[in-house]
Amino acid sequence: MSAYARFGLPVALLALVVLFSLTSPTFLTAANLRSLALNHFAILALASLAMTLVVTSGGIDLSVGTAIDMAALAYIVILQQGGAPPLAILGALGGAALVGLFNAGLIGGLGLPPFLATLGTLFIGQSVQQLATNGGVPIYLISGAPRPIFAAVDAARLWLVAFAILGVAALLAASLFGRRLVAAGVGPAVAYYSGVPVRRDLGAVMILAALIAGVAGIVLSSSVRSYAPLSGNGYLMDAIGATFLGTTFSPWGRANVAGTLLGVLLLSVVKNGLLLIGVSFYWSQVAGGAVILSVLAVSFLNRREA
Amino acid sequence: MPKPPNRPALATALRLGAYLAFAAILLVFALAAPGFLTLGNWLNVLQQSAILGLLAFGLTIVVIGGGGNVVTGGIDLSVAANLGLAAAVYASLVKHGYPDALAAAATLSAGLAVGALNAVAVTALGIVPLLATLAVAKIVSGLEFVLTQNSVVTATSPFLAWLSDNGPLAVPVMAYVLVLVTLIAWPAVQATPWGLRLQAVGAHREAARAAGLPVKTYVAGSYLVSGVFGALAGILSAAYLTGSSPGSADILLSVVVAALLGVVFSPRLTPSIGGAASAVLFIGLLNNGFQLVNISSYWVSGVEGALILFVVACTPSQREAMS
């Protein structure tokens, strides 16, 4: 890939920010940027960081939304039953960890390809949620006593995102486990014959990714004060999009934290900005897809053909 | 990772296992649900499977031409969005008083355009199919929103009524459509020069290129075919639902499952139309059986998920080919 193709993504992001700043008086206001960061960026960033870890290891996680949902389900049900907030948070992480463990068993244990394994998990997770909620009835916690835990999570969510970003970046860049993951992603056979416990690492990364998605589930259900079945799946395609848009930022075309964050920012800015400049909600979907396709085109046109 | 040893005998045994699982499930339903084994019920299943079947054929053809690797090989994630747009185009035109012929022509053109966009993105721009078709899906479902304002468009016309009705011998017309399309697509992929070359392109791109095949043309063609299948499925959907309604994206994962399960039902464990047809029938019968024995439909996706995992776990070649 030529050197400047890498910068298609950040240049496009910058151009969009300039465009929206010039065309919408509200885009660059503190209130809008705050809403953009809190509502569009935070949850997608967490889901995409989970995806980035898995894609780095050479896999893909179609059940990232399932982990979000299972965490949200456990969190809201425990709170609804009068459980203490710390217990609810532990329960949420436990629910997400179950999804991760299941994936780990399939991928690390049985050696199934990640795409199919997590597709199976996604389907099973759908059934579990439908059975638990009588076909998809949301669980609301709006009424009743005030719940300080929601406000606390709301206030902490950007810190949670920042922590996750630093954690994943440090893990991939500086830890032995992270380097092994990169090795497994680049060349699983070479990694295996070099003594990397590839299967075990692939299993471990699924659990880690599910836990990060679980945090996204806690943030999501805290902000809407409810659990809506299958709502986590709405983040799946955008998380894949952000992560793979991010690969265009790497000189080697690999998933990377900085690129993923640029991808998440691009998707969030497009969504937010198009609405602000008065593009109808429906056209904004078309425009959003066209922007993504253009960024991909610029980045891939300069790559050597596969 | 070390590749599992190549044991054809084992693979055959496991493929037979998939058929046996198929037969066992049919047997359970036949015993548990009195109406399951009747001809009328099976025709019903064929009718209800037509839309999924057409989309699965389109996706299968893309996978055949692009190769089995899910991320870098052939995949078309825009099939469901294409279905939604096609149904919306057809329903909107009929609703505004245009004749069926014009609506059909416009719908097929829309499907072809979606396929062409995918083809350009994948072959000319060189974008990885998973991402290219994901972005195209976003655009296409956005266009459906623009057209319908995210609401239900009801449409009735003579052609739609005919499609959703019974044809000769009291067999649903959509069942005829599914069988007919299967009978055309199967030999087209398995026996014509085009189909065999497409398989060569997907199986070993470099070898196909070295042998002088215009590789990109074949890959582009597979996306065009998938686009047309999406449009046809959209017309069926407009007939089945007497119009278009939002939420067509939900079918995407079922289509992916049908195409992937189809691999297991194929003689050489490669994607094929016959395999996809078997998988679609299997999924249709499963859904139908659950309804007949009165098990909550909430279980269906879980059973489908468990089935994918079981089948993939039992198929060693699948483990390497599809990773």
Image: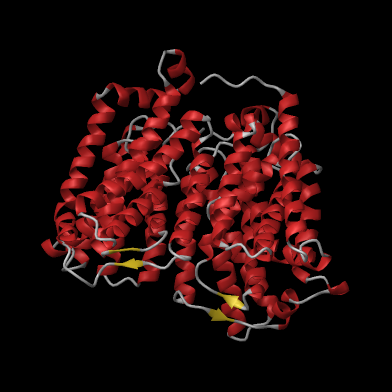
Q: Is residue B293 left or right of residue A31?
A: right
Residue B91 screen position, x and y as percent: 59, 77
Residue A133 screen position, x and y as percent: 43, 63
In this rendering, is residue B36 above or below A112? below
Residue B205 screen position, x and y as percent: 62, 32
Q: Quadrant of the C terminus of chain B?
A: top right
Q: Is residue B92 left or right of residue B274?
A: left
Name the image quarter holding residue B94: bottom right
In this rendering, is residue B286 above or below B64? below
Residue drawn 66% across the image and 33% down it = B203
- Residue located farthest toward the top when viewing the structure as drawn: A194
In this rendering, is residue B227 above or below B242? above
| Display colour scheme | secondary structure
Residue in front for this viewpoint, A188 or A244: A188
Name the image quarter holding residue A288: bottom left
- Residue located farthest toward the front when viewing the structure as drawn: A82
- Residue located farthest toward the right when viewing the structure as drawn: B169
Residue in front for this viewpoint, A93 or A165: A93
Residue in front for this viewpoint, B126 or B309: B309
Residue drawn 36% across the image and 47% down it = A95
- Residue located farthest toward the left when viewing the structure as drawn: A30
In this rendering, is residue B139 above or below B87? above
Q: Is residue B226 left or right of residue B278?
A: left
Residue drawn 78% across the image and 49% down it = B186
Q: Is residue A77 left or right of residue B81?
A: left
Residue B296 screen position, x and y as percent: 57, 63
Q: Is residue B116 visible?
A: no
Residue in front for this viewpoint, B91 or B305: B305
